[in-house]
Amino acid sequence: MTTPHDDLFAEIDALSEDDAEQVFWFHKWDDGNPHCDVCNSPRWYSISRRMVYTCADCRHQYTARSRTVFASSKLSYRQLLRAMSLADEPNLTRKRVREALGVSESGASPLLARIRLVRATGTIRLPK
């Protein structure tokens, strides 16, 4: 059975994890440029290949997931993009989340709650 998201999922799956992280940046910050979650400084540097960034001004460490509804999630960035794309489905169920993201039944419930929060607020960012 095909779903409206199959073409979008194929595009997401074709991304590398680094490219998916960059897309996630654009969802976290409107301009797509990362800046510190604490002091809002646009100056940062990357720590090796761990996708962890350090603010050049206050030294706070953060990732693309920090201060988002997906902050504690262990999903890949591709799976997170898939989850975000499900937010526009009106009758989203735990079963649909499980099938779309390849997670367990128990893992689908908290993700469904996060996806509904994205739908309600229109953003993945958490308020300060």
Image (cartoon, helix red, strand yellow):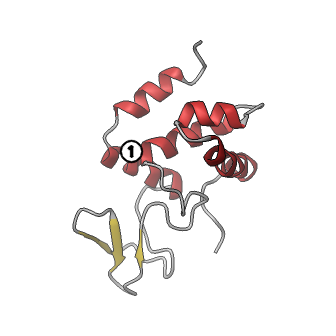
Q: Position of residue 38 (x, y in %)?
A: 51, 80
Identity of the residue furthest to the left in this view: 48
Q: Would residue 11 be found to the left or right of residue 46 on screen?
A: right
Q: Would residue 3 be found to the left or right of residue 27 on screen?
A: right
Q: Position of residue 87 (x, y in %)?
A: 66, 39
- How many neighbours does mark 1 have within 10 angstroms: few (below 14), some (14-19), or many (20 or more)? some
Q: Nearer the viewer, residue 98 or 42?
A: 98
Q: Position of residue 31 (x, y in %)?
A: 46, 56
Could you tell me which residue is drawn at 65 percent across and 47 percent down? Answer: 106
Q: Secondary structure at mark 1?
A: helix
Residue that label 1 marks = 20
- Residue 119 against residue 41 in the figure, above or below: above
- Residue 38 against residue 107 in the figure, above or below: below
Give the number of marks.
1
Q: Position of residue 118 (x, y in %)?
A: 67, 50
Res. 92 image quadrant: top right
- The kind of residue on which mark 1 rests is Ala
Could you tell me which residue is drawn at 43 percent across and 48 percent down? Answer: 77
Q: Nearer the viewer, residue 17 or 35?
A: 17
Report the quarter where the N terminus lies. Answer: top right
Identity of the residue furthest to the top in this view: 1
Could you tell me which residue is drawn at 34 percent across and 70 percent down? Answer: 53
Could you tell me which residue is drawn at 43 percent across and 42 percent down? Answer: 78
Report the quarter where the C terminus lies. Answer: bottom right
Q: Nearer the viewer, residue 8 or 56?
A: 8
